[in-house]
Image (cartoon, grey):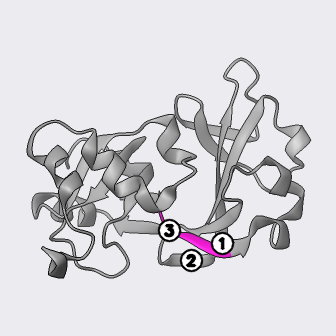
Amino acid sequence: MHESTRGRLLVATPSLLDPNFVRTVIFMLEHNEEGAIGVVLNRPSELPVATTIEPWAGRTVPPSVLFLGGPVSPSSVIALASVSLDDAGDNWNQILGRIGTVDLDVDPTDVPGLDEVRMFAGYAGWSGGQLEAELHDDGWFVVDAELTDIHTDDPLELWWEVVGRQPGPVGRLAYYPRDPRDN
C-alpha cells in the first residue's frame, strides 16, 4: 500500500478521463488497507443547503449549496467543518488541523467552536488496493491540502489554483487549457 492520503488532496491528472472525476480535487477523509473515501471539493450543485438541511444552513460558507461529493451513495450527506481546536467536542471528527467531519444529526449549537461548514452529497470511494492502482497509473496527483481549499468561495477554479501552487511540472498545468480543443 502507498502512504495514506488521509487529510491530503487528490488532484485529477489531465489523463484521468472518467466523467465523474475529470479535473476534480478530492479531500481524502480516510485511506487504509480496506479502501479510501473522500469528497469532491469543486463540484457545487444548484441545490441550496437551506432546502435540504435547514438547521445547518446558517453555518455554511458561500456558495451555500450542496456539493456533489462523488458518485457513491449520492443520497447521503457528509459535512466538513472547521472548528476551534480548543473547543472541539464529540460531534466532530478531526481529519486535518481544524477540518473534520461533523455529525449532522445534532443541532449546530451542540458542536463547540463550530466555524465554517460545507455539505457534500455522496462521496468518492475506492476498495482496498483500487486507489493505489490509480496512483500507480498516474491518475492522481497527491498534494497537501490547505484550509482555503476546503471552504473555497470559488470552487470552479480550485483545480487550477491547487495545481498552480505546486512546484515543477505539476504547477505548469495551471496553464492547461480548460478545453484542450482550444490549444
Is residue 158 in view? yes
**Viewer-nearest of discs 1 and 3:** 3
The residue at the point 26 percent across, 48 percent down is 163
Where residue 84 sits: x, y (%)? 70, 24
- Residue at point 59%, 78% (across, down): 74
User: What segment is highlighted magenta in the picture?
Assistant: 40-46
Which numbered dot is residue 73? 2
| Left or right relative to 167: residue 59 | right
Q: Mark 1 Cα within 10 Å, few/some/many (few <14, many 20+)?
A: few
Q: How many marks?
A: 3
Crowd band around label 2 with a 10 angstrom C-alpha radius: few (<14), some (14–19), many (20+) = few
The three-letter code of the residue at mark 2 reads: Ser
Q: Quadrant of residue 137?
A: bottom left
At which x and y percent is residue 148?
A: 51, 39
Question: Do the CB atoms of the residues marked 1 and 2 lie less than 8 Å apart?
Answer: yes
Instruction: Please provide percent x and percent y for residue 149.
Output: 47, 44
Residue 94 against residue 117 in the figure, above or below: above
Question: Which of the two labelled residues, at mark 1 and mark 3, occupies the earlier sequence position?
Answer: 3
The quarter of the displayed image where residue 159 is located: bottom left
Q: Which residue is mark 3?
A: 43
- Check if residue 6 falls in the magenta segment: no
Query: For the residue labelled by badge 3, is the local secondary structure a helix, a strand or a loop?
Result: loop
Q: Mark 3 belongs to which amino acid?
A: Arg
